[in-house]
Amino acid sequence: MAEQLFDGDEAHRGDIRGAFGRISEQDLGSRRTWRARLLTLAAIIGPGIIVMVGDNDAGGVATYSQAGQNYGVSLLWVLLLLIPVLVVNQEMVVRLGAVTGVGHARLIRERFGRFWAWFSVGDLFVLDFLTIVTEFIGVDLSLGYFGVSRYVSVPIAAAGLVAITASGSFERWERFMMVFVAANFLVIPLAVMARPRGGPIVHHLFVPGIAGGLDSTSALLIIAIVGTTVAPWQLFFQQSNIIDKRITPRWINYERADTVIGSIVTVIGAGAMISACAFALGHSHFAGQFTNAGGVARAIGQRLGAVAGAFYAVVLLNASLIGAAAVTLGTSYAFGDIFGTKHSLHRKASESIGFYAMFAGLVACAAGIVLIPHAPLGVITTAVQALAGVLLPSASVFLLMLCNDKEVLGPWVNKMWLNAVAALIIGVLIVLSLILVITTIFTTVDVRLLLVTLGGALGVVLVVAGSLTALRRRGASVPAPSEPVRRETWRMPPLALLGRPPWTRARLWTMWSLRGYLVVAVGLLLVKAVELSTGHRA
């Protein structure tokens, strides 16, 4: 398909203008030297690393701190396992963005209908809004450590985020984000101050285990780690940000590298935070006594000195700001897709009023909730990361279906091995959320036995599904060879020319079952969050 067929906002076409370089739209030259390749990567880098570091947000800092303070370094292995999850999920998003030129929410609407689009985006909106609230809780707690009132810090942070985003320049916005990305590395000297020991870190990185054993509370925390590291908003943000940056299939390998780099940086930052809290607060009266990120800052200040406490507070502030910027922008992109409004950071506020109004409105409402006296901020903070983990399987199912849609991705559709890996990831996520649901209802259940039972059931389901798929492929007729297609110039045809894929009974049954399960799981998750935030543990 010729590349001139384009189905998006005209602002999404033109030169790539990144924080560290530019690439002309007419640039067709090959990159034969390492210098040329590195300069190209520098210009492309952005969407992948921003979406990954943005997920180490205020909720992430709180979750990793809780893991370190309450469980030491025993949960580091979870982070290592999340690297392939991050890379597989976001690599599919990279292809969708570069090849289609259309946002994630719009693809769901056009390929599966308005109902399923609202199902997907509705869940996203609720989760994202609560996540943005936690970012401003992080702003309050971080600057509160220095004695700044929330009635000063939160409004200033909100106004600053709106000003950065509504500047009308993608290049300027990305440079601001890269400052936040660089500040993320302050967690490394913080971890060094805690005097970590390499032996326990290496052991728990490669040997799964949980200090104190697996129970409903530790299961909730593991799901929260998954949810804060691999969140549904990432799919919507990175796909739209790739489109907004004007990345096409020609540059897809560079964007893949951007995503892998971001995944590694994110996991290193998360591991450093867990280690810092584990070694700073372990074997003290603070161990096992996590309250919130503000309490961790004060505890680290007492244990390691004022400089370390200030470092933690600055890391929390930076995480809150980049998280709020990325999550809010991802939500605004999604609603621009659903309502068909112009949504590009290349546009000035006067050219895209609805897009920037949505961004400013989300920021203002989330900041306003944090300023309400006696608002249930503890419940929100506890629930939001685990909620992301529960909703992620639904978002991943839509992603997988889109990446197997030949009309959408043509020669870029998933390979069979990638489908197998993605199916395994979705299955594991569902098992984790099932453990949470069952242990919330039946508080005395043996969690280890439950894990083995559900894991075995998942294995059987995957083997049966894989066998049926292999049989269907073997019995299918082999199409005649067609004219070779140049992948780097293939783009999705205009959506209006594509026929909507049929809904089979199996697909409908699966989607409605997943929808029903999510309603139950989310309700029970809220029950568990209230129990933990009020001190009544199951």
Image: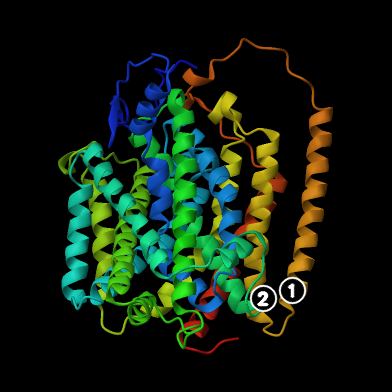
- Residue 194 in the image: above or below residue 347: below
Element type where label 2 sits in the image: loop
Residue type at mark 1: give it.
Arg
Residue at the spot 55% in from the left edge and 69% down from the top edge: 73
**Residue 36 in view here:** yes
Q: Position of residue 247 (x, y in %)?
A: 39, 30
Residue at the spot 45% in from the left edge and 72% down from the top edge: 277
Instruction: Describe residue 496's horizontal placement relative to residue 537 as left or right.
Output: left
Residue at the spot 29% in from the left edge and 74% down from the top edge: 141
- Residue 217 in the image: above or below residue 174: below
Are the two marked residues, 2 and 1, in contact with CB atoms closer than 8 angstroms?
A: yes
Q: Position of residue 427 (x, y in %)?
A: 68, 55
Residue at the spot 29% in from the left edge and 53% down from the top edge: 180
Cα separation between marks 2 and 1: 7 Å
Q: Which residue is mark 1?
A: 448
Q: Which residue is mark 2?
A: 214
Q: Residues within 10 Å of mark 2 (few under 14, many from 20)?
A: some
Q: Quadrant of the C terminus?
A: bottom right
Element type where label 1 sits in the image: helix
